[in-house]
Amino acid sequence: MSTSDPAAPAGRPLHWDRTIDRGLVHRDAIAEVLLTDLLRTGETSFLVAAQWSRSHRVYRPDATGRHDPMLFLESIRQSGLAVSHLAFGVGPDQQSLMRDVSFTLDPRTEPRGLLHSTNLAITVDCRDLIVRSGRLRGMTLELTFAADDLQFATGYGTIRWISAGSYAALRARTGHRLDWDQLRWSSTIPPRVASTIRDAPDVLLAAEPGPGPRRRLVVPLEHPVYFDHALDHAPGMLLMDAAWQAVFEHRGDRARLVSCALDCPTFTELGVDTDILLLPVSAQTTEFAVLQAGQRTAFGYVRVGPAPP
């Protein structure tokens, strides 16, 4: 483990020379670990170090060096997991549920990843802690992102923790859970084409357009990032990226993603036809809904700014 004792106040600078234990952020591949350090700065506040690479498998910088905004969401997810395990004693037998996540970016101050990776210092404040029988059951994270001592974004996320038994009972009640291995080997991926922001293997939308502002979601179970490890539902990172891809394609311009939010009130199941429905509300903002069998399983918004110069 590459962190000092997070229960002690920070007495040294952050480091970016190695990642934290991959198990702390629920990743199988070491290459998918973004966090490099974690220090406590208060009873419920922390300083997290992360590094954004120039060569991520999916989330690569654009031609101007601006990092893929999906890295905000993955950094928020990993920060919530790492803080829960390291600072609040959540054990590996607990199951995490990321209920909602969002970020807002200031394009005027964001760093560029043209010549080197970007080292981030992320301030994390934990609010509305839910503790039962001495165990953390949930909290809201408020995050501030900075690089080279310059703040450039804020983020939020709500994480819940339940026991493995409670999780199994919760999933059994949905009535849709399928065997992942059987589903993986029987799944077929509809045709996809490369886009401006994603290579063909990373496109999450079927090539055929849907009726109106609606696109069919593609769930590539063999994908090394979206499914870094076996899951029994479509992960939030996949849903948010699919919504952004759909908005980007629907707009038909090069607008920059500057803010987005995802709320997941229930599970988006595997093996069930799933659509992304777009609901434009202004020139900059598009709301979206994830639909399965006519029911909304997730929703949120995407907000864009001017295209990079």
Image (spheres, rainbow, N blue to C red):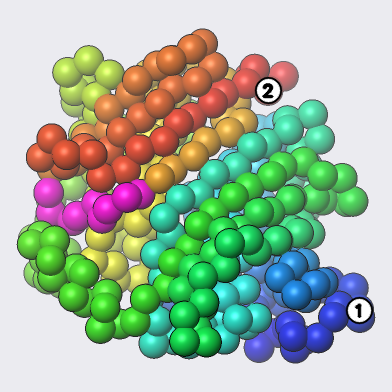
What's the mark number on residue 12?
A: 1
Q: Secondary structure at mark 1?
A: loop
Locate residue 162 relative to residue 74 in the image: left or right.
Answer: left
Give the number of callouts. 2
- Judge by depth and name the residue closer to the eye, 307 or 153: 153
Magenta stretch encompasses residue 266: yes
Locate residue 15 relative to residue 251 in the image: left or right.
Answer: right
Q: Kindly report the distance in space between the C-alpha atoms of the residues bearing marks 1 and 2.
A: 37 Å
Instruction: Tell me if mark 2 has few (under 14), some (14-19) or many (20+) residues whose alpha carbon lies within 10 angstroms of its own.
Output: few
Locate residue 136 relative to residue 194 in the image: left or right.
Answer: right
Provide residue 245's location: percent of width, then percent of height.
41, 32
- Judge by depth and name the residue closer to the eye, 69 or 286: 286
Magenta residues (range): 264-272
Locate residue 179 relative to residue 34 in the image: left or right.
Answer: left
- Residue at image point 30% right, 82% down: 164
Which residue lies under the disc numbered 2? 308
Q: Quadrant of residue 257?
A: top right
Q: Quadrant of residue 93?
A: bottom left
